[in-house]
Image: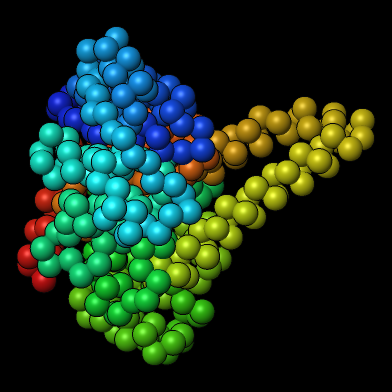
Amino acid sequence: MEELIQSQTPVCICVDALGGDNAPGVVLEGVDRALAVDPALSIILTGPKEVVEPFAATRPRVSAVATTQFIDMDEHPAQAVRTKGDSSIVAGCRLVKEGRAQGFFSAGSTGACMAAATLVMGRIKGIARPAIATVIPSPVRPVVLTDVGANADCKPEYLLQFAQMGSLYAQHILGIAKPRVALLNIGEEETKGSVMAQESYALMKEKLTNFAGNAEGRDILAATYDVFVTDGFTGNVVLKTIEGTSSVLFKTIKGIMVSSLATKLAALVLKPGLKKLMTQIDPDTTGGAPLLGVRGACIIAHGSSNAEAIANGIAAASKTVRVDLVGMIAAMAAND
């Protein structure tokens, strides 16, 4: 996480204390971790009075905004955002809109976070649709996949903007000097895929100087390119497939390693290498997925996030603010 801290520029991030399966305990622990490594970071916690106020009272860089409502994971996102204005998620996005915080982090409902950021913070002028980008922790190097769930139905123009925003994220957050963008498709040839895929290919080829062509699913973990662009439906299926495969694979390997004396001895030899691999592909290292295209830094994490993931997500939000990624996306949209 420490490498995510770009400078000592003061930054204030609002954190949803109720976000996640193990909230508020794991969120509060993550906040403490984030504060410990970033002396220029301050936090506003949104959540129940009995949770946020005692925590803030003992920490000089934490303030509390008490809320009375909570958005559950199974609620309709847009409806919940409209009817629960005093929820921890909506209040957090409102603090960003009002300028009291510069970014928002939550491990709560992805749909509600996306709806609140879009409806409350607002879209950047010129951005047709905000997109959720995620950093895939490939064993080779991290890559960006976008969109992964915000927009199930897309137009070529949307995918072009996803590519542009993903490129800026890869360059300024991941530190990839010249990110290569690829369109996720069913083949490498220009004529492959649906009508939308072919039209998207033609538009990216025309508009993007860093467009490298079509990519297939096997190219993601191989990190053949730096930014993979697709619609939110496909991107979400791809992301869940990668996560599920990784989980099953490591559980299977673990079962094999303890199945006999011989494999247990082999496990002792392989343990350092396997541990390094698990660290390389651990999603907790990235902390969450940015919602690109809204007027404020917004990082959305897994509901199952642990304290390390919470801390890393807050750090990612801080870096997004410090490099002024929102300003860069706004300038890009204004020049299109």
Q: Please, is residue 196 above or below residue 266 in the view?
A: below
Q: Is residue 232 left or right of residue 322?
A: right
Q: Is residue 142 visible?
A: no
**Residue placed farthest to the top in the image?**
58
Residue 322, image x and y in percent?
18, 37
Residue 12, image x and y in percent?
19, 30
Residue 239, image x and y in percent?
51, 58
Q: Residue at x 39, y 82 (%)?
A: 197
Residue 124, image x and y in percent?
14, 59
**Residue placed farthest to the right in the image?**
261
Of 44 and 279, nearer the camera is 44
Q: Please, is residue 258 above or below residue 296 in the view?
A: above
Q: Residue at x 77, y 27 (%)?
A: 268
The mark tally for this picture is: 0
Of 185 and 224, nearer the camera is 185
Figure quadrant of residue 180 = bottom left
Q: Is residue 320 left or right of residue 9?
A: right
Of 237 and 107, nearer the camera is 107
Q: Residue at x 36, y 63 (%)?
A: 150
